[in-house]
Image (spheres, rainbow, N blue to C red):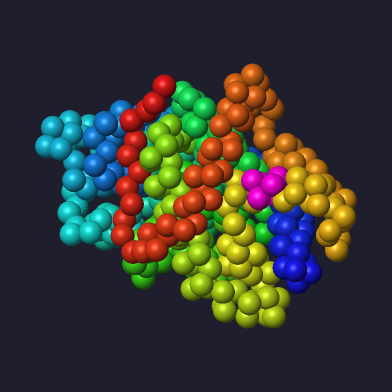
Amino acid sequence: MFILELIILLYFVYVVAYTAFFAFAGLFYRTLPTPEPSGKLNFCVLIPSYKEDAVIMDVAQQALKQKYPADNYDVVVIADSLQPATLEFLRKLPLKVVEVKFESSTKVKSLNMALSQLNAEDYDYAVILDADNVMEPDFLKRQNALLTAYKFKAVQGQRKPKNQNNNLAFLDGVSEAINNHVYRQGHTAAGLSSSISGSGVVFDFTLLKTKLSKMESIGGFDRELELQLLQEGIKVYYFRDAGVLDEKISQAGAFQNQRKRWISSQYVYLAKYFKPGMAALFKGNFTFFNSAVLRNIQLPRLINLGLLTVLTVVAVLLRNYLAYGATIWVALFSINTLAILVSIPGEYYSKKMLKAILDLPGIFVRMFLLLFKLKNANKKFIHTPHGVTSE
């Protein structure tokens, strides 16, 4: 019993220390100054769209409204299983439509097919969006200023919620904001690589084309792509000032499917890159070790928060029977709570958040149960539909 208590305690000491360190590091994040650019880079905006008829027509039109010269960027919709009427509408717009069809669709396959049909000489950088994403009007303008000044190979923009129509969507937005602060701002401020979201991210065109051509990821391609970049010493910079609006999940079923895919891919890549990650540590490459091992070995944040809450309550009630008492558990819970609170932007503190918090216990239970349903989850593509909301 003593050994079990020690193992659980050490795990949560690690989780809380990790979260707190990067949460407070995120407070020191500062965007790099961007002087007036000397020229205009050419961008290719890639939008994979699998059965996204409900949103892709509006998203495509919005993508064409950038405050950036039309001659310096192309919008490419990768159309997988779209309806004929949707395709007809898209082909009337000043953009490129790459129609694809696979026996088993994945985002990597779609991106590779599109990239194979585009000339690398025409573009400096590629932007990856989800089919529901809307770039803020100055997204490309800001990226151009940053990239001409600093020549980054990979830049993650800030993903912001496009909708907050119910408690689940609101909490999904809060979760994204915490991720931005801890895993992007905090990591960048600490000199490490920002995590990649999978959309709202910009890559050197040739680099992306080369890396993706060697990948066959089914779920969580962004995790593997990040790790492959880090193996070559290429860090991802987080650019908070370039924003992309992302549709947040508002239906319980879609939320569970999305999280199931995310959790499964996390542990698939933990297993795949654990040995290289440990080897990198001994070679002094802490950045790769952090992304391959330290971040992936943790349970999802909500599950950690729920378990820590339960264990703290149990520790207080059974403090006389524990080898380490309850004080350390109360301290861990307090530090973790403070770290999360400082990671949430001020605009989220409202009556709406107080109301949404009441749904957290139920979401925690559903998330926890997903841990026992991960078998084969990363062996097939799990689609998250967009444009379908619940009030």
Height in image: 155 above or below 227?
A: above
Instruction: Give the residue at x 42% y 57%.
Output: 373
View extreme (top): residue: 351
Looking at the rendering, which quadrant does residue 173 occupy?
Answer: top right
Looking at the rendering, which quadrant does residue 105 occupy?
Answer: bottom left
Question: Of residues 121 and 48, which is closer to you in this image?
Answer: 48
Task: Give the extent of the magenta segment.
Answer: 305-310
Instruction: Give the residue at x 22% y 32%.
Output: 93
Question: Of residues 335 and 107, which is closer to you in this image?
Answer: 335
Instruction: Give the residue at x 67% y 32%.
Output: 345
Residue 248 shown left or right of residue 215 in the figure? right
Looking at the rendering, which quadrant does residue 104 occupy?
Answer: bottom left
Residue 55 can be seen in this image: yes
**Residue 307 inside the magenta-drawn segment:** yes
Residue 118 can be seen in this image: no
Residue 103: x percent and y percent? 18, 59
Residue 164 shown left or right of residue 384 in the figure? right
Residue 106: x percent and y percent? 30, 56
Height in image: 339 above or below 88?
A: below
Instruction: Give the residue at x 53% y 68%.
Output: 270
Height in image: 5 above or below 75?
A: below
Residue 115: x percent and y percent? 30, 57
Which quadrant: the C terminus?
Answer: top left
Question: Of residues 60 and 290, which is closer to you in this image?
Answer: 290
Main secondary structure along the magenta-highlighted residues: helix
